[in-house]
Amino acid sequence: MSTPQAPGSAENAVPDGETAPPEALEPGQVWSLAEDAPQEEVVSVAEGSKEALASQGETIGKLVDTLDGLALTVGSVRISSFDVLFLLATVGLVLTIAWFATRVARSTLRSATRFDEAQKVLAEKLVTIVIWTIAFFMTVDLVGIDLTALAFFGGAFGLAIGFGLQKTFGNLISGILLLLDKSIKPGDVISVTDQAGNEAVGQIRKIGIRAISVITRDQTEHLIPNENLMVNQVVNWSYSSRDVRVKAPVGVSYDSDLELVTKLLYKAAEDTDRVLKRPKPRVNVMEFGDNSVNFELRFWIEDPEEGLANIRSDVYMRIWRLFRENEVEIPFPQRDLHLRSSKQLDQLVELMSAGKLQAE
């Protein structure tokens, strides 16, 4: 049979450093196993910055306390007027610094002489990404936002990238890869095909984050997604050299002196300004056609961005004048029509002849 122990015995003693709340004790009980209920912590934005500003002076401290007193608490988050103003000021300051740093970096890179155009564009993109990434983390640190609180939003943002922004990030990576291998760079001349299937030659003005800008001779600016240039075939007229060969086919009559025609074609190329002397033009006899002997004049230019159709037109105009001066005939297609005789055709001819005689 157990005997009740005295209230001051060791079993009923309160452990060192622990105090049982009075409402948790029963009559005659000195200690209890019940724990204090945890207090809900209120999260406030920019707490450290608030204390730092308040310590600058009594006037600033009163102003901070006044603004901090106008607050709204939602759950465990407390947002005051001071928090909103501090957030706007911090974001504005960081954006201004990042914008200024980006401009300075671009100006510095563009003045660098050791980089070509593709390397300069790539360096600008990488520096811009680094600057704005640093600006984001600086803003988060100054405002005092716990990054663990953004874990949910980070997951949602990653999901949005996977579905909605897949093309955007694909174009971004494609643009960086194009600049790395230097297959496409500002100033290159490429062939552009519109939605109707018409091909035009244009010059690359800019390689952006999402697309490249190509302007043609008629001042039409095409925006082509970077990803299209990675997966589709592209004709780059100035990839390894800016020299472009232009072909001008010409047909002459079978009665013409072929040696004279060859000399006149060479002279037409020599008399045109944009045609290069080196490599030399070349005249080839391509075939003996149905109505003409077909030649092809091949010549080189070094400024394809100035247009291909106009230089071909200038050469043709010079060929036309030289052929007329030297009486070289350019034939045109001729056809002989043969009608087979039949009873119905003979009757029709007789009726037409009788009608003509009556009219006379």
Image: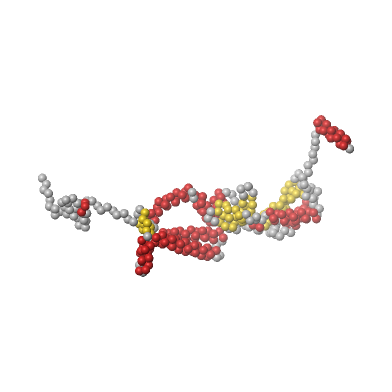
Q: Quadrant of the N terminus?
A: top left
The image shows residue 245 at horizontal and vertical percentages of 67, 54
Query: Residue 110 versus residue 44: which sits nearer the camera?
Result: 44
The image shows residue 75 at horizontal and vertical percentages of 35, 53
Residue 45 shows in the view:
no
Query: Residue 77 versus residue 136: which sits nearer the camera?
Result: 77
Residue 222 shows in the view:
yes
The image shows residue 173 at horizontal and vertical percentages of 51, 53
Query: Residue 181 versus residue 274: which sits nearer the camera?
Result: 274
Residue pictured at 87% horizontal, 37% vertical: 359
Vertical order, 354 against 193 (above or below)? above
**Figure quadrant of residue 357:** top right
Query: With 114 as the anchor, is 197 left or right in this view?
Result: right
Residue pictured at 58% horizontal, 53% vertical: 223
Q: Quadrant of the C terminus?
A: top right
Query: With 13 as the anchor, is 58 left or right in this view?
Result: right
